[in-house]
């Protein structure tokens, strides 16, 4: 969803947001918003030096740039990068544990796609505010509880889009108008087994929805381990 300008409206639908520091098994890394597993030891090679960046084009909230980087061995390479302000995606659950999915047209794929609700962050906007707004616009529900459950780069080979994922529960009807230029069909409720089946059969081909399934599975696995400890 395109970034809007409705911070106040979003805040009205946000009753409680769990900061990342309260989410079990996750902590912030030096980049702030991006979660990493607690206790994970990461050894990173030196990052290449950015020696030139040339703007090529822009459209709305994205920019295409051509970067030249130099690796530690002296080799220089050119990379085209789509700069993106980032986005959020939400696993929206009712009291029975069903997932709320939406179907909308994705022009790059030339198809209507079944997926979890999602939207683009405005420049400088906290992911929690984006999430509170988008769930109301795309599903017609406000979430009384938003819990950050992880994050993922969607296409790091060429795009800087990083999606922050939330679990949205304690739902109540409180819609916001959809953005102009978007048409989202009536939301669809699926059980977790039905979501898995939709992925296996190709009914769901959306990467962020498949990533969300992994995050929820990891969360449930960790919860089971904590219960047995």
Image (cartoon, rainbow, N blue to C red):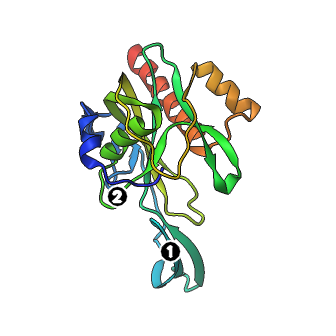
Residue 80: where, in percent of width, then height? 58, 75
Residue placed most toward the observer, 120 or 172: 172
- Residue at the image position 30 percent from the left and 59 percent from the top: 124
Position of residue 131 relative to residue 121, above or below, is: above
Quadrant location of the C terminus?
A: top left
Residue 58 numbered mark, or none: 1
Tell me the crowding category of disc 1: few under 14, some 14 to 19, or many 20 or more residues within 10 angstroms, Cα based: few
Residue 135: where, in percent of width, then height? 41, 36
Residue 31: where, in percent of width, then height? 34, 58
219 horizontally vs 183: left or right: left
Residue 116: where, in percent of width, then height? 53, 36
Residue placed most toward the observer, 139 or 98: 139
The quadrant holding residue 195 is top right
Ranked by sequence position, the earlier of labels 1 and 2 is 2
- Residue at the image position 45 percent from the left and 80 percent from the top: 49
The quadrant holding residue 196 is top right
Residue 180 seen in render? yes
Callout 1 secondary element? strand
Q: Nearer the viewer, mark 1 or mark 2?
A: 1
Tell me the crowding category of disc 2: few under 14, some 14 to 19, or many 20 or more residues within 10 angstroms, Cα based: few
Position of residue 223 relative to residue 163, above or below, is: above
137 horizontally vs 184: left or right: left
Residue 161 numbered mark, or none: none
Q: Residue reaching furthest right?
A: 201
- Residue at the image position 44 percent from the left and 19 percent from the top: 94
- Residue at the image position 49 percent from the left and 63 percent from the top: 160
Q: What's the CA distance linking mark 1 and mark 2?
A: 25 Å
Callout 2 secondary element? loop
Marks counted in the figure total 2
The residue tagged 2 is 31
Residue 38 seen in render? no
């Amino acid at each position: 969803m395109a970034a809007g300008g409705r911070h106040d409206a979003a805040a009205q639908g946000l009753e409680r947001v769990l900061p990342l520091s309260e989410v079990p098994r996750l902590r912030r890394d030096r980049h702030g918003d991006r979660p990493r597993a607690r206790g994970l030891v990461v050894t990173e090679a030196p990052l290449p030096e950015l020696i030139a960046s040339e703007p090529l084009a822009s459209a709305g909230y994205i920019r295409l740039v051509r970067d030249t980087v130099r690796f530690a061995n002296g080799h220089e390479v050119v990379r085209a990068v789509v700069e993106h302000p980032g986005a959020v995606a939400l696993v929206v659950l009712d009291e029975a544990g069903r997932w709320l999915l939406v179907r909308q047209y994705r022009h790059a794929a030339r198809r209507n796609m079944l997926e979890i609700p999602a939207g683009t962050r405005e420049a400088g906007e906290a992911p929690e505010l984006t999430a509170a707004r988008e769930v109301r616009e795309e599903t017609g529900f406000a979430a009384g509880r938003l819990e950050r459950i992880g994050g993922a780069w969607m296409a790091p080979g060429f795009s800087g889009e990083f999606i922050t994922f939330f679990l949205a529960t304690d739902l109540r009807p409180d819609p916001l108008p959809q953005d102009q230029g978007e048409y989202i069909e009536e939301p669809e409720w699926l059980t977790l087994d039905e979501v898995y089946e939709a992925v296996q059969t190709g009914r769901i081909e959306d990467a962020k929805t498949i990533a969300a399934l992994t995050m929820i599975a990891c969360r449930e696995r960790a919860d089971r381990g904590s219960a047995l400890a």
